[in-house]
Image (cartoon, grey):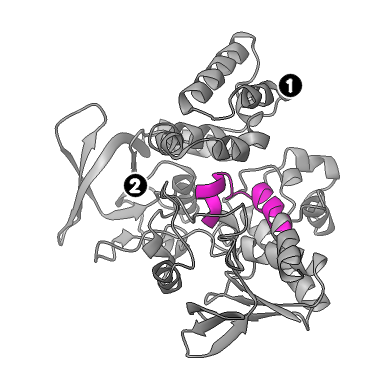
Amino acid sequence: MKKIAITGLGYSGLISAYEILQLCENIEITIYDRSAANGAGIAYNSHCNSHALNVVASKMSAIEDKADDFTKWLLDNSLIKEEGVADTFFAKRQYYGKYLLSILVDMQQRYHDLVKIIRVEVIACNKLSDGYKLTMADGRLAYYDAIILANGNTYDSNKINDNRYITNPWDFGYLEKIKTGVHVVIIGTGLTLVDIILGLQEKGYKGKLTAMSRHGLLPTTHQFYKEPMLNYVSEFLANNPNVRITDLFSIVKSKAREAVSNSHDWRNVIDSLRPYTQKIWLKMDIVNQKRFLRHVRAYWDILRHRIAPDTAKQVKSLIDSKGLITIAGRLKCVQTNDQNIVIAYQARSKRNIDYIHADYLINATGISQNPDSYGVLFKQMLADGLIRWHENGFGLAMENDCLLSSKENVYAVGPLTRAYLWESIAVPDIRKQAKRLALQISDDLHK
């Protein structure tokens, strides 16, 4: 009997365990998570009614081989009336969290002798001649044949010792302490900002919100179109075995202009890239990957990661009423005093420094790029050479899309692999990756 440890019980950890149990025989899995996560993780653990998925329900099955699994769950729980609705329905995120919990419960019932969950932090992983030794925060030791890192999203640790600075934007307990009328400044203008806005409004907040990012760009909105997918990407890849970001940007911009001039939807140009984004990323050298992250990422994020139409209406209404102001600028420094928080920033295309006085400051910059943010286990594994941080700075270095090194039975899945794959944070990407991981585990442990 082979033994596997998984660190993290968000979606990545849950679906990896599920796929391995479906495919592999004579496998025991232990999932470690110090939190109370039950498959939802940070992304789908929201209790705000206003927080919706950013993808239509019909595309959000958690299981690769069951395309309509989430749709069936919604029907079974009377959350939609007919199957066709799922093609245009942006379900509440709390619904999705309950759906993932149902998968976890079913998995535990079906495989109760083969899977267990331990609520403790893993603080060390040491290689042995015949496997790996894990050390827990409470001193316990456990031994495994393979390790899967599925820690998911994390955030930068608190660099300001002040309870008016909200480090973790996904711990929505702060919504209760922010009183109406105060000035809240948010660093970041992406999807996390939208969550914060909707959460505050749901709690009855009325006041001034200021959001800042380098470009000051807000997410675009989903629209439904009937145009067939474009086929320009396969031809581009055939002609560009080594992708340069300037060439890619040029063709995407050209196709978008062509679409708009023909009264077609520009979204189709971006969506037609979707099946190829990982291939494109892997064809870029490190110079072009860094160039993309530095110059193109902000635009890619708003065009690729869109929000539901109803959500967009709420954000627009807030902007129109001057309840939300966005600033394109670079944060320079933050100082605190008894009265407020003082934020110094340099507006885009300006040389002088401006200042904002806030009652609360919220970090909404997204997933941390700092390996130290991932805890003591990562620090130890990095120091011992069991894992490496990718040269582009966005996650772990990988041998392939699941395996960290050909010399180790140490694997990763989900957001930790985005440096290697780029697109590995959304459910449709992770469920495919988890399926491939199960196949690789089966091959590696049964050689």
* Left or right: 405 as drawn, with respect to 179: right
Question: Residue 21 in the image: x percent, y percent?
Answer: 78, 69
Question: Residue 101 in the image: x percent, y percent?
Answer: 70, 67
Q: Is residue 144 magenta?
A: no
Q: Is residue 348 above or below residue 77?
A: above
Question: Residue 180 in the image: x percent, y percent?
Answer: 36, 54
Would you name the residue on which mark 2 appears? 187
At label 1, the amino acid type is: Glu
Q: Are marks 2 and 1 in contact (CB under 8 Å)?
A: no
Q: Quadrant of the C terminus?
A: bottom right
Would you name the residue on which mark 1 appears? 227
Which quarter of the picture shows residue 18? bottom right
Q: What secondary structure is found at the residue carrying circle 1?
A: loop
At label 2, the amino acid type is: Ile
| In the foreground, 127 or 353 | 127
Kindly identify the residue that appears in the image at 80 percent across and 50 percent down: 71
Q: CA distance from mark 2 to mark 1?
A: 37 Å
* Residue 133 visible in the snapshot: yes
Kindly identify the residue that appears in the image at 49 percent across and 27 percent down: 244
Q: Quadrant of the N terminus?
A: bottom right
Circle 2 crowding by C-alpha within 10 Å: few under 14, some 14–19, many from 20: many
Q: Main secondary structure of the magenta part?
A: helix
* Disc number placed over residue 158 in the picture, else none: none
Q: Earlier in the sequence, mark 2 or mark 1?
A: 2
Which segment is the magenta one? 416-435
